[in-house]
Image (cartoon, rainbow, N blue to C red):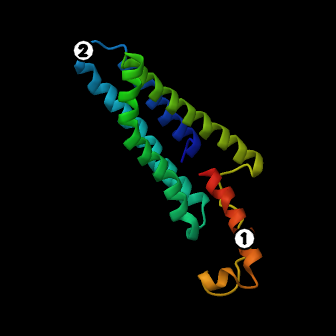
């Protein structure tokens, strides 16, 4: 809270960027232990910060979607990352390129967070809650209601929610 959520997230991603590069330089397996701890520190900075940002920026009814927008690529990266790393090592003939690719992806993530933080500041200057459109009167959306007279208004509401999804 003292440094700002975006700065903490960028710091965590940068720690994650440094660790794989250093892993390509070490010659003793024992040195991987502190480097994995550095990786863990980076993840420990990113994960709760992003969840706090979601809780802070996203209205309660959209939080599940926003958390899914973060979790799905993250977990997909964990699943695909191992096989992708093996493929990169196989194609290049050198396993170090898998570490370099990991570092590059994390650096890209840090740049994305930085760009989004500046974009958010230009829009409103703070990490406050977003401005929500007026709620559509009536019960929660059912299939029959989508085709009702208010359907065009509901499409506009979904379009406005995409800005929140893009931000996540």
Residue at which label 1 appears: 155
**Quarter-wise, where is residue 159 in the image?**
bottom right
Residue under the point 40% across and 33% down: 84
Q: Is residue 103 above or below residue 113?
A: above
**Residue 71 drawn at (x, y percent):** 46, 52
**Residue 162 drawn at (x, y percent):** 67, 59
Q: Is residue 19 left or right of residue 64?
A: left
Residues marked 1 and 2 touching at CB (< 8 Å): no
Residue under the point 47% across and 43% down: 46
Q: Is residue 104 above or below residue 112?
A: above
From mark 1 to mark 2, how far is it between C-alphas? 58 Å
**Residue 127 drawn at (x, y percent):** 65, 52
Residue under the point 72% across and 63% down: 160
Q: Is residue 10 above or below residue 70?
A: above
Tell me the mark number nearer the camera, choosing from 1 and 2: 1
Residue under the point 58% across and 42% down: 6
Residue at which label 2 appears: 28
SS under mark 1? helix
Is residue 28 visible to us here?
Answer: yes
């Amino acid at each position: 809270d003292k440094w700002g959520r975006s700065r903490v997230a960028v710091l965590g991603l940068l720690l994650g960027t440094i660790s794989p590069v250093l892993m390509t330089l070490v010659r003793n397996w024992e040195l991987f232990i502190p480097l994995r701890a550095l990786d863990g520190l980076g993840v420990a900075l990113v994960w709760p910060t992003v969840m706090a940002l979601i809780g802070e920026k996203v209205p309660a009814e959209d939080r599940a979607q926003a958390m899914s927008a973060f979790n799905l690529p993250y977990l997909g990266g964990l699943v695909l990352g191992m096989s992708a790393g093996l493929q990169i090592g196989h194609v290049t003939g050198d396993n170090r390129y898998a570490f370099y690719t990991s570092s590059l992806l994390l650096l890209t993530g840090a740049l994305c967070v930085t760009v989004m933080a500046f974009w958010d500041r230009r829009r409103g200057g703070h990490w406050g809650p977003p401005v929500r459109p007026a709620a559509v009167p009536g019960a929660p959306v059912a299939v029959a209601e989508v085709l009702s007279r208010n359907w065009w208004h509901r499409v506009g509401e979904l379009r406005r929610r995409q800005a929140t999804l893009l931000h996540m």
